[in-house]
Amino acid sequence: MSGAHGRHAAGAHRRPAPNDRGLGPGGAEWGPPEAPLPAAPAGASASTKRAGRGRGGGRGDLGTEITASLVVFLVALPLCIGVAVASGVPAELGIISGVIGGLVVGAARGSTLQVSGPAAGLAALVAETVMEFGVAMLGVIVLFSGILQIVLGLVRLGRMFQAISLAVVQGMLAGIGLPLMFSQLYPMTDARAPGTPFENMAGVPGLIADTVTDPQALVAAGLGIVTVVLSFLWKRLPGPAAVRKMPAALVAVGIGIAVASLPGVDVRTLQVGNLLASVDVPGPGQFAGLADAGIITAILTFTVIASAESLFTAAAVDRMHDGPRTRYNTELIAQGAGNTVAGLLGALPITAVVARSSANVQAGARTRLSRTLHGLWLLAFALLLPQVLALIPISVLAGVLVHSGWKLFAPEEFPKMWRQDRGEFAVMTLTTLVITATALLEGVLFGLAAGVVLAALRMSQTVVRQHIEDDTAKVVMAGNATFLRLPRLIDALENAAASGKPRIRLDLLGVTHLDHACRSQVEEFVAQQRGAGVRVELLMPELTATGSVPEGRGTGRGAVPPRPEAPPVSRPMSVPVPVPVPVPVPVPGAVPVPVPVPGAVQVPTGSAGPGPDAEWFYLDTRPMSEGAEEARAGW
């Protein structure tokens, strides 16, 4: 018998109004209750009180917000340019996407502190799409991906993207990061990548040999290596805290510009044009491409990957601060609005980016103002100082992306997953390998399928034991009996039938779930054996809303018939004879001992009797028919 137990959290919280932040009891959606902010201690300064309000999601300090926006701008600028170069499109399109991520997505109310823009995770996918369909079709693909995101948010499917195995998510990120690293090793030496991820990996020895013999390539490689090293070690270097707060990518860009300006140094630098002239609004010719199945596939791929990456990032950023939580459906609509505008301008797709978001949180931002302002700084810089961008070496931007690829790949997660769960490790590894070998969508679908198969196998843990006891062949099952375990069940039933015993007992009381395939197999076996004259005892669990098994319930030949009612038994009335007994002294908290009554069903001491969730089982003990008895005697 089982009972329901309620859980009550310590402390009183008000029930939040329904919104799109989660599912509550009864299907109502709301987010976690926001804990009230502690009162500021006596004598606290005004700035302390303002910081407390910002930490709880209220108004932040304006100066802190502006400072945080400048920090995010410095982080976003090289990333926007680097992602655009890695995607095979002009650098201006990356800046346009960064501006949209700040001014459009940043002004929306889905999330407070996460920052959006062109992401390194989509660089390989965008590069493949541009190579296959051209830059002109990119706007249409991004446009309709944004529209789909808006639709998904409106129908409140933002939470759906969280129902994905963590192993698939980590495998997807690793499958994005690994090819990104190897593809950017070539721009780090001012060379061109061969093509596919495996071709890029196989060409690394030749790349090293060519770089060693070319002095200019060595300079470019040195700048890229310095960028990667700074990205890993900048926060750990000794020095003033104010200096170490500067983004490592910006420091590397400054070093690269200084080295590239030296006499005798001839490394490739960024080619920057007019920002407004790079806007390419899709026309009728591009919209006609929607009839192509490849374009539709690309739209679906962009939608799924961009949405998943944004919402996974939102969950990660929520763990970095104690302000308002992300409203997932609203955030998905905001991401869709940003991609819709980006598609209309022919720019890169937009997702939430962990690097910019973490920089925003660490800089002390409390409101959406900082992420919105960073888009304004990007726009002003691109319009007023485009000549500065032309001084940035390509190898430095490639180094920034190599570091981003390593963070996405996260090799330390593989041994951690191996120690925690080897089945999930297999799913994670297979997802990474399939993405690397084929494409992003195929790899993610394969990973999802592998995760579902693993979950189904684990949910189908069935124990089947069989043994002979006197004249009875016994088969005992426990666990979840699904069609995946049907071969084992059939073997056990056939062995019981082949034992030649006149009685077969099937004990399924330990089965917690019996699907239609296994139930049908058991019922057919019981009907066949009873037809052959074998006595079959079937113990079948079944639970209804009232906790009892309805008599006569079941379909098919193995259904349990109604239990025959016992005839009423007349009992003579007895007059109790008073017997002097000592009167017990009441003891607080003591449990009274029940007095046995003849003919009554005794309930164990301390038991309240069967509750509404009690499970009842009925053993079929009907006597065999005469024909069956004769068949048994002759057999």
Image (cartoon, helix red, strand yellow):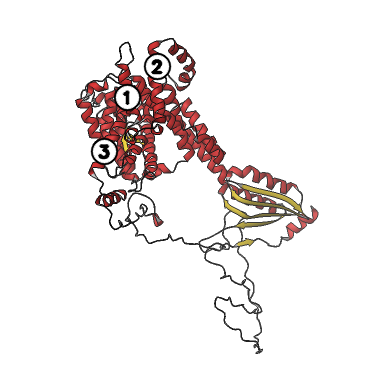
Q: In the rendered structure, find residue 67 and report the number of the disc placed on it.
A: 3
Q: Secondary structure at mark 3?
A: helix
Q: Which residue is mark 1?
A: 253
Residue 354: which quarter of the image? top left
Q: Is residue 629 visible?
A: yes
Residue that sits furthest to the front in the current view: 239
Distance from the alpha carbon under mark 3 to that under mark 1? 20 Å
Q: Which residue is mark 2?
A: 189
Q: Secondary structure at mark 1?
A: helix
Distance from the alpha carbon under mark 2 to that under mark 3? 35 Å
Mark 3 near mark 1, Cβ–Cβ under 8 Å? no
Is 219 positioned to the left or the right of 590 in the image?
left
Of residue 483 and residue 119, the one placed in the foreground of this image is: 119
**Given the image, on which type of amino acid does mark 2 rest?**
Thr
Q: Secondary structure at mark 2?
A: helix
**Given the image, on which type of amino acid does mark 3 rest?**
Thr
